[in-house]
Image (cartoon, rainbow, N blue to C red):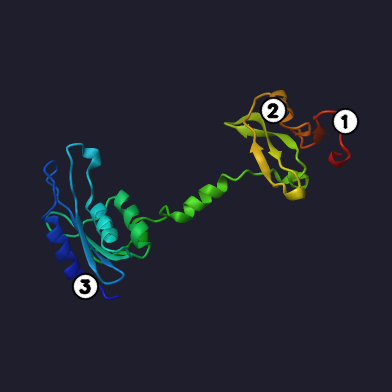
């Protein structure tokens, strides 16, 4: 898509003249080219409660979606002198969200991509990674014991200190029962507390000691399938 930077900047200057800046006297205007060819604008709007002041780019993004959505292709942001102005860090994140890494921002001597202004930006894929990290993690040495309806108690580190934790594993899935982890344990400084947590949930409790050796600590003798 061809970008008419002069036209884009002229629209940004016009928007800047409508900025509400009684406290800073620092008007900002912005204009954006959308991927369907339309042009949108925004200006900064200040507030006596400084923290709720809206940057011009906030207005731009609101206008983007109020007029039909789409993706920003190019953006011109200007200050009171009508010259190109770099968006603040928060607004760079806004532009990344609604224009992506390749969205162009007017700058001197050449336009810059958002990825140049905000490398390693936070995006939707980071939320996916964060959600995935919440999934319970089973120590690799215990994977072969999955699916036995057992509580496993094992050592861990917290703030550099040795603690005890564990997880309550579901059954094998026979008769339509769910598989996987049913519950993760809190952490304790005392292994006996961790074992007690497990025994409340099931008579099948296995301890993995600090050397990685497994020991039955549930009720009764060691079942054949836990040997």
Which circle's residue, 2 or 1, is located before the other in the chain? 2
Q: Quadrant of residue 203?
A: top right
Give the number of the disc on residue 186: none
Q: How many circles with numbers are drawn on the protein?
A: 3
Where is 146 relative to 63, above or below?
A: above
Q: Position of residue 87 (x, y in %)?
A: 26, 54
SS label for mark 3: loop
Question: Pointer 3: residues within 10 angstroms few (<14), some, or many (20+)?
Answer: few
Query: Which residue lies under the disc numbered 3?
Result: 4
Q: Which residue is drawn at the image coordinates 51% and 52% (left, top)?
A: 128
Give the number of the disc on residue 197: 2
Q: Quadrant of residue 18?
A: bottom left
Q: Which residue is drawn at the image coordinates 76% and 47% (left, top)?
A: 172
Q: Which image quarter is the C terminus in? A: top right
SS label for mark 2: helix
Query: Which residue lies under the disc numbered 1?
Result: 221
Which circle's residue, 3 or 1, is located before the other in the chain? 3
Q: Position of residue 226 (x, y in %)?
A: 84, 39
């Amino acid at each position: 898509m061809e970008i008419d930077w002069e036209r884009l900047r002229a629209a940004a200057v016009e928007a800047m003249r409508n900025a509400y800046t009684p406290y800073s006297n620092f008007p900002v205007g912005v204009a954006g080219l959308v991927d369907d060819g339309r042009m949108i604008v925004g200006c900064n709007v200040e507030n006596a409660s400084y923290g709720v002041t809206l940057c011009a780019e906030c207005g731009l993004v609101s206008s983007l979606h109020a007029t039909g959505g789409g993706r920003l292709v190019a953006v011109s942001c200007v200050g009171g002198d009508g010259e190109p102005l770099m968006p603040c860090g928060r607004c760079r994140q806004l532009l990344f969200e609604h224009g992506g890494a390749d969205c162009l921002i007017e700058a001197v001597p050449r336009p810059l991509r958002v990825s140049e202004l905000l490398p390693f930006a936070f995006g939707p894929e980071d939320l996916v990674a964060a959600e995935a990290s919440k999934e319970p993690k089973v120590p690799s040495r215990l994977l072969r014991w999955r699916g036995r309806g057992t509580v496993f108690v094992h050592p861990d580190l917290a703030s550099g200190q040795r603690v005890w934790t564990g997880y309550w594993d579901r059954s094998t899935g026979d008769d339509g029962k769910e598989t996987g982890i049913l519950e993760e344990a809190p952490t304790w400084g005392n292994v006996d507390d961790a074992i007690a947590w497990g025994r409340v949930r099931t008579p099948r409790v296995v301890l993995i000691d600090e050397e990685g050796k497994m020991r039955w600590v549930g009720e009764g003798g060691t079942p054949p399938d836990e040997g």
